Structure formats: C-alpha cells, structure tokens
Amino acid sequence: PEPAARQGKGRGGADRREEAGKGRGGGGGCGGGEAPIMSELTDEANPRPITVAIMQELQNLKDKFKNEDDHEDSPFGNLEKAAVLQECRDFHDPAIVTTHPRKCCQLITKLLFLLTQGDSFSGNEVTDVFFGVTKLFQSEDVNLRRMVYLFIKEIAEATHSDEVIIVTSSLVQDMNSNQDLFRANAMRVLAKIIDPTMLGAIERYVKQAIVDSNAFVASSALLAGAHLMSVAPEVVRRWISEVQEAVNSSSEMVQYHALALLYQIKAHDRRAVSKIVQQLTRGAVRSPLATCLLIRYISTLLREDISATNARAAYQFLESCLRHKNEMVIYEAARAMCRLPEAETRDMSPAVAVLQLFLSSPKPTLRFAAMRTLSEVAAREPIAVSKCNDDMEVLVSDRNRSIATLAVTTLLKTGSEGNID
C-alpha cells in the first residue's frame, strides 16, 4: 500500500527521473546538473532532500554555538562630541538641574565616555564643560553629586589651575556638610585636585576626619592623606597621632588604610617601622587586609636583615598566620615564609604543607596562587616540593591552562627519571 500511496499522491521515481531529464535538456549550466544529484539524495521515508536537512542541522548548530564574544553595540557608540557639548548647556539651567538630575547624570556619563575613548577637548571646551558641571552643585541629588565628584577628578588635570580654584570652595562646603557621603567624597576629590599651596585651608578638616566615628569618612580622609604624601609629605606627617589612633579602629577598612598611611609616613625610618611591627604583631590587628600588609612589612624587614634581634618573633608571627581563618592571610604568610632569604627546607615545611592543601581547593584562584608559589620554591629547593607531586599530577589536567602549565613545569623540576614519563 505504501508504494501505491506514493504513486498516487506524489511523483514516483520515474516521474522524477523524467523531470530531471527535462532539466538537463533545458536548464543548462550548474542548475541543470544539480537535479539528478538531488534526486539521488532523497530519503524514501521522507521526500525532503537530505542536503536540505543537513544544511538546517548545521544552521541549528551555528545558532547553538554562537560566538560568545558577539554582543550588542554600546548605547554610546554613535556619540558625537559636538552634540554632547551642545546638550551640556542644560547644566546652566537651574530648573533642569534641580528637577531632572537623572538627565544630568546621563550627560556626565556621555562626557566620561568620550574622555575614556580618547576624544580630545580644546581649552575652551574644557573650560565651558567644567564651569557647567560646577553649576550642578545646586542639586542635592546624591547620585548626581557622586557623578560630579567623579567627573571633576577626571577633568581636573586638563583644567587650568586658576579655574580649579573656583570649584574648591564648593568642595570645602561639602566637607562641612551634614551628609557623610558628601564629606567623604569631597575630601578625596580635593586631595587630587588641590594645589599644595592651598592645603592649609583644608588640613584641619582632613585631620579631624581621620578619627571620625563614620568609617567611610575616616577611610576617605586616610586615602586623601595617602594621595597628599606625594605632593606635601611634611603636612601629612603632622597627622601621625591621628593616624596611629585610626590603626586601633574597630573598622577593618579604616584599620587597613591607617596602617598603609602609617607605613608611608615612617617608611624612611627603619627603626620606626620595626617598632610598629612589634606593636601590631601582639594581636592588635583584626582586619585581614591589614594583616596582609603587616606580613609584607615583616617580610621586607627580614629580607633586609635576617639576623635581626626580633627575627625569630617575626617568623613565629608568620607561622601563626598559617592558622588564620582567612585564606588570603594564610596564603600571604605562606608566600612570605617561602621567600625568606636563606630559608631551609625545614623552615618552609609548614608553608609548603598549607600550599599543598590549597592545591585541592575548589577555588581556581587558590590553586593558581599555591601552584605559582610552589613553582618558585621548586626552582630553589625541589626536595621541599617533591612531597606535593601527587597533588600536582592531578592538576596537569586542570581546566585552567595556567594552572596546568605551572603543574607540568613544576613537576619537571621535582620529578625523577623514574616518574617523569
């Protein structure tokens, strides 16, 4: 019945061959030669040519495995500088500034995009835009004010110093604002754009803010001090008592920034740095980031003088950090111990044992960090790393190519003739 049905409803093989012959006779060229091929590639159960089915399957696979790098065009891709500068004239309209802060935020975003793309602004254009942005201080919108701070930091370097003075008064007012967000960001902007000769006008405010009860304000003041160290170090050194007080803050962020600034102030005095390290190794540091900084300072001191009187106490502190609850601190301590000058195998054993545990961590960052440090150690002391060979052999097939490469190169350093194959 099936052949009969096909014969009744569709064209049979003879009909198709006959039609193909007509195609050869009248079609000519490539089109006339394709008909018999298509007829031969027809499935009996499905009259649709197999070539069509294959093409559709390939198209489906192409759509399925579409290049992940393909993305939509940027909404700012077709921006024209002249059009954006024309729109920025709205900054001079108080009604738009106060009632449409979102529109002003979008205009600043466009300006920042043009700056980051390398578009050059003439002197007059920079001046016009800068003065227009200063008009946005009329708005009390928090998001708009943050965009203003960001734009001023980016454009200040291209602005004449006489013009920057104009915005300084507005930033000083924000430093005395009741909103902590305004106070904190104003200090950070001022530290980047202010002329060193005018630093005396804001020194008192920044100095007081270092010990502020708000952690964001205190951290911003400390960051301002870190920026000012490059232009007015003698001024920042007068804040030493406030910075030392901030090191004992209950906020982890404040403690981290305070320790970083304290080290910048004392970096020229090795004895003072050694004293700070001795005080903080007694358990006064609670911030994991501050602990990592302290480990680096200890490592620097030990590399400079491994035979110092407090070297043993410093090494014991590094060893105690291997039992810290934070993985970042544990790795920093292990790396510092492995990089100590003239370190013997027994001195590095605790650190290598910790790094060996990291090799089986589910986090790729930990595996990579441990593998890189072990590779460095293997170049000097291959015997100390040889006990990790079994774990490193597993990482040869790691999905991360960097980890797999480090595993292979390290095994070549620690392997023997018997297991190198």
Image (cartoon, rainbow, N blue to C red):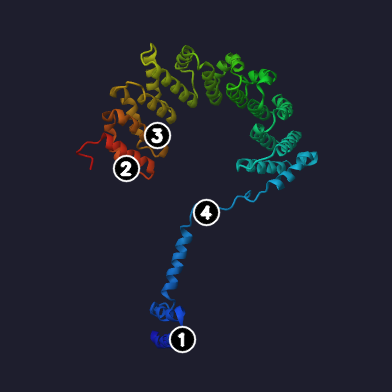
**Separation (CA) of disc 2 from disc 4:** 31 Å
Mark 1 lies on a secondary structure that is: helix
**Separation (CA) of disc 1 from disc 3:** 71 Å
- Which residue in the protein does label 1 denote? 9
Mark 2 lies on a secondary structure that is: loop
Q: Which residue is drawn at 72% across and 39% down?
A: 125
Q: Nearer the viewer, mark 1 or mark 3?
A: 3
The quadrant of the rendering that contains the N terminus is bottom left
Residue furthest out toward the left = 418
Q: Is residue 44 left or right of residue 59?
A: left
First-in-chain label (1 vs 3): 1
Q: Does 21 sit above or below residue 268?
A: below
Tag 1 and tag 2, C-beta contact below 8 Å: no
Can the viewer see residue 342 in this picture?
A: yes
- The amino acid marked with disc number 3 is Ala
First-in-chain label (1 vs 4): 1
Q: Does 154 sit above or below residue 275?
A: below
- The amino acid marked with disc number 4 is Asp
Tag 2 and tag 4, C-beta contact below 8 Å: no
**Separation (CA) of disc 3 from disc 2:** 15 Å
- Which residue in the protein does label 2 denote? 396
Q: Residue at x 28, y 35 (%)?
A: 413
- The amino acid marked with disc number 2 is Val
- Which residue in the protein does label 4 denote? 70
- The amino acid marked with disc number 1 is Lys
What is the x, y in percent for residue 173? 73, 26
First-in-chain label (3 vs 2): 3
What is the x, y in percent for residue 267? 50, 17
Across the whole image, how many numbered discs are drawn on residues?
A: 4
Q: Which of marks 1 and 2 is in front?
A: 2
